[in-house]
Amino acid sequence: MAREATADVCAVDGCGNPAARSLSANRVKQALPELKLGTTGRRAHLCRQHYREFRKKTKEDRELERAAW
Ligand SMILES: [Zn+2]
C-alpha cells in the first residue's frame, strides 16, 4: 500500500474526509454539539467542510456574545 503521508482524517463520525485543520476537541464539541466525534483525544481534526461549519458556529457565538452586551 502506498501512502503519501500519515494523513489525518476528519474526526466527525462517518465523514472520512482528509483533515484540513486540527482544533481543540472541546471547542469543536461546544460549537457543534450535534456532530458526533470519533475518538480524538484533545485534538480534533476537521475536514474543510466541517471546519467551515465550525467557523460559522463560532462566529455566530461571538456575535451573540457581542449582542448581549
Ligand atoms: Zn468532516
Image (cartoon, rainbow, N blue to C red):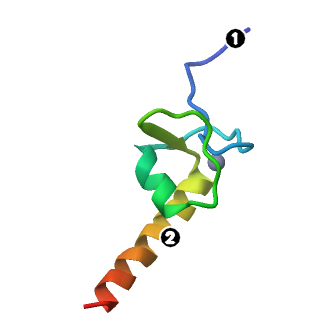
For image coordinates 61% across by 34% down, the residue present is 9
Badge 2: residue crowd in 10 Å (few <14, some 14–19, many ≥20): some
The amino acid at mark 2 is Lys
Identify which residue, 31 or 21, lies in the foreground. Answer: 31
* Relative vertical location of residue 40 with respect to residue 26 in this rendering, above or below: above
Q: Residue at x 71, y 44 (%)?
A: 15
Give the labeled residue for mark 2.
56
Is 58 drawn above or below residue 25 in the view shown? below
- Residue 42 placement (x, y as % from top left): 41, 36
At label 1, counting other C-alpha atoms closer than 10 Å, the crowd grade (few under 14, some 14-19, many 20 or more) is few
Instruction: Identify the residue under disc 1.
Output: 2
In the image, residue 6 lies at what x, y percent? 55, 20
> Of callouts 2 and 1, which one flags the residue occurring earlier in the amino acid sequence?
1
Q: Is residue 50 left or right of residue 57?
A: right
**Quadrant of the image occupied by residue 22:** top left
Residue shown at the point (43%, 68%) measured from the top left: 58
Task: Measuring from the top left, give residue 68's x and y in whole percent.
Answer: 31, 90
Q: Secondary structure at mark 1?
A: loop
